[in-house]
Amino acid sequence: MSLPITYLFVPGDRPDRFEKALGSGADRVILDLEDAVRPEAKATAREAILGASLDWSRVVVRINDVASPYFNQDKTFLADLEAATVMVPKAETVDTLAWVAEATGREIEVLAQIETVRGLEAVPDLLSHPAARRAAFGHLDFALDLGAATDWEALLYARSRLVALSRLAGALPPVDSVTTDVQDEARLREDAGAARRLGFGAKLLIHPAQVAPADEVFRPSDAERDWARRVLDVVAQGAAGAVAVDGKMIDKPVEEAAHRIFARAGEINA
């Protein structure tokens, strides 16, 4: 099974969009209780989510952050939630992730969203929790916390550090932040390509039209898979270190790169 690449946000108070989002081709649909829902609609959104009949294995629910006045209500709500994953915005302490995991009363995945400098520096601790398999970046709130611009150049260090710390923790490649201009496919592809080159493994999305382009950018191309297959075929024949593929000697890093291409594609070399 391939790792999730596309995570599509849907307001939690718009149940009419839940099934449409799941039908968009997104690997995961994030039913949002935080930024996309007005304070007076939070309770309605919780009821809508609990009342929905969905493929919960593909559903993520983003609750409100621990410092908000809605967090305790969300914790109570989690006890009845069927979603496989809970996203914790502005995650800064492993205790918060533990509270969320315990509140569900069952085994779930917790997706830690890094939106503050304190959260970024806490990534090793956050990803030490057994329910936290990967982190996600929230560039808009991070820029606000840092007092920086929101463009890629301004936040390049933060993104790169998140990728490095995720690798250090043995976690999955993190999920990059949203592209806010839903009508600019070229910008989406540029953002997704930059994230992939940096080491991110997935992307947050805010419109169904962004799903297919983002998936195409992150998923290995036919040419990459062909190269990886030829490399691993040579390795299987016991010729590693003695034969070049496309002019490049096959050593351990090259072999590992080939394995990672198949892992990204959700395949086993055959």
Image (cartoon, grey):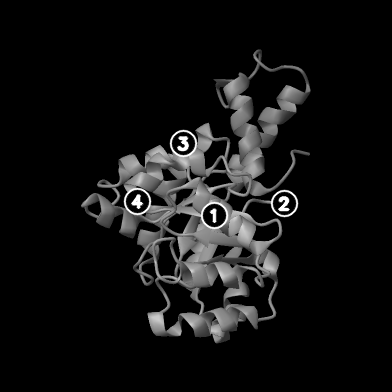
Residue under the point 44% across and 60% down: 66
Q: Quadrant of the C terminus?
A: top right
Q: How crowded is mark 3: few (under 14 residues within 10 Å), some or many (20 or more)?
A: many
Tell which circle, 2 or 3, labels the residue nearer the N-terminal end.
Answer: 2
Residue assigned mark 3: 165
Residue assigned mark 1: 111
Q: Which residue lies furthest to the top in this view?
A: 242
For residue 183, side relative to residue 199 (left or right): left
Q: Is residue 48 above or below residue 225?
A: below
Residue assigned mark 2: 1
Tell which circle, 3 or 4, labels the residue nearer the N-terminal end.
Answer: 4
Residue under the point 33% across and 46% down: 117
Residue 240 placement (x, y as % from top left): 68, 17
Cα separation between marks 2 and 1 = 19 Å
For residue 178, side relative to residue 127 (left or right): left
Q: Residues within 10 Å of mark 4 (few under 14, many from 20)?
A: many
Residue assigned mark 4: 116
Residue 187 appearing in the image = yes
Residue 132 placement (x, y as % from top left): 58, 48
Question: Which label sits in the foreground, 3 or 4?
Answer: 4
Residue under the point 55% across and 67% down: 75
